[in-house]
Amino acid sequence: MRRPNDAEKNTETLGQQGRHPDVTHFSASISIRLTLLQLAVAAMLLWFVVGEPVSDVANLLFSTGPAPWEEVDLVYYPDKYGRSVSQITPDIGSLGECRTRANYQAVQQDDPRMERGTYECRTASARLFSSQRVYRLSLK
C-alpha cells in the first residue's frame, strides 16, 4: 500500500468548501477580534456619554492633588464650627496659590493663625452645561 505525499494530504484535508482548516480558523479568529474591538469601542462610547472620563483619568493619575486641566477654588470659612458662612474665590490657579490666599483672608479676618477659621482648596473640572460645581477633591 502506498503512502500519500504531502500534497495529497493537503488536498484530503481541504473541507467541502475547498478551504484549508487553518484558513477557516484564521477567519474565525479575525471575526472574534473584530467583535471584541466593536464591544470595546461601544464600551468607550458609553463611558464618554454616561460617565465622567475626565474625572476618572484625574482620579487615576492625580489622586492627591489637582490635575493640570482642573480649576482650584478657595472656600474660606471665617468660623470653622459654623460652616454655613463661607467666602468662595473661584479658579485661583494652583494649590500653593490657594493656600497663600487662604492665609491672606485669615489675616484680613484678624485670625492670622487660623484659630477661628479654616479653608478648603477644592478641585473641579470646568463645567460647560451646569452652573453648579462638582468637586473632585477637597484639600488643605
Image (tube, rainbow, N blue to C red):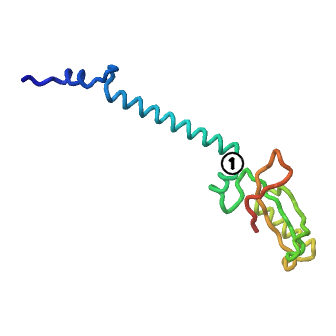
> Within 10 Å of the Cα at label 1, are there few (<14), some (14-19), or many (20+) other Cα atoms?
few
Measured from the top left, where is residue 134 in percent x and y?
A: 78, 56
Q: Residue at x 32, y 28 (%)?
A: 21
Q: Quadrant of the C terminus?
A: bottom right
Q: Residue at x 33, y 29 (%)?
A: 22
Asked whether 72 or 14 is in front, the reply is 14
Vertical arrangement, residue 2 with respect to residue 119, above or below: above
User: Looking at the picture, how far across and down is residue 43, in whole percent?
Assistant: 60, 42
Q: Position of residue 104 (x, y in %)?
A: 87, 68
Residue found at the very far bottom of the displayed protein: 115
Q: Which residue is at a point 8% across and 22% down the rendered structure image?
A: 2
Q: Is residue 14 left or right of residue 101?
A: left
Quadrant, the N terminus: top left
Rendered residue at 80%/48% (across/down): 127
Q: Is residue 62 left or right of residue 84?
A: left
> In the image, what residue type sits under mark 1?
Gly
Q: Which residue is outermost to the front?
A: 16
Q: Residue under label 1, please give it.
A: 51
Above or below residue 120? Residue 68 is above
When asked about the image quadrant of residue 73, the answer is bottom right
